[in-house]
Image (spheres, grey):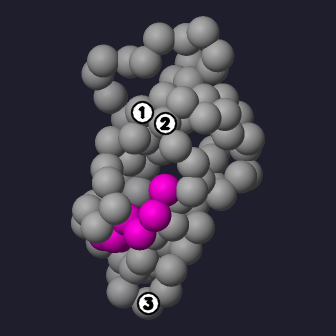
Amino acid sequence: MATILEMPKLGYSMTEGKIIHWIKNEGEEVAAGEAILQIETDKVNYEIEAPESGILAKILVKPEDVVPVGAPMAVIIEPGEPVPTQLGGGS
C-alpha cells in the first residue's frame, strides 16, 4: 500500500517548511529510517526520513518550495505497486 510522505510538524509553532534538497531521486529504493530529503524551518534544518521501505515513486515538491505542515511531499510504494492517482492523506 502506498505511503504518502507529508510535511511533519517538528515544533509547536511550525506551520511550514522549505524544501532544501532531495537526497533520494524518484525511482530509487528507500529504507525505513533512511534520510530522503532536507527541509528548513524557521529555526533549524532537518533531514526527513522515509517512514516505510519501498520505492520513492513520486516527488510532489521541488527544492525552494515552501510546504505547509501536513501537505503531501512524496509517495513511497512497494515494488510492483502502481503509483496512486489520488492522494488522500498519510499512511
Q: Residue at x 63, y 20 (%)?
A: 78
Q: Earlier in the sequence, mark 2 or mark 1?
A: 2
Distance of label 3 from label 1 (alpha carbons): 28 Å
Label at residue 43: 3
Which residue is the extreme one toward the bottom?
A: 43
How crowded pointer 2 is (Cα within 10 Å; few <14, some 14-19, many 20+) is rated as some
Element marked by disc 3: loop
Element marked by disc 2: loop
- Residue 62: in magenta span: no
Q: Nearer the viewer, mark 3 or mark 1?
A: 1
- Closer to the camera in the image, 19 or 71: 19
Distance of label 2 from label 1 (alpha carbons): 6 Å
Dot 2 corresponds to which residue?
26
Q: Quadrant of residue 17?
A: bottom left
Q: Amino acid at mark 3?
A: Lys
State left or right for residue 45 relative to residue 71.
Answer: right
Q: Quadrant of residue 79?
A: top right
Asked if 55 appears above or below 39 in the picture, the reply is above
- Residue 3, given in percent of the width and then of the height, sits at 52, 32
- Residue 35, given in percent of the width and then of the height, sits at 65, 57
Q: Amino acid at mark 1?
A: Lys
Q: Earlier in the sequence, mark 3 or mark 1?
A: 3
Label at residue 58: 1
- Mark yes or no: residue 24 visible: yes
Q: Residue at x 52, y 43 (%)?
A: 25
Q: Are marks 2 and 1 in contact (CB under 8 Å)?
A: yes
The number of callouts visible is: 3
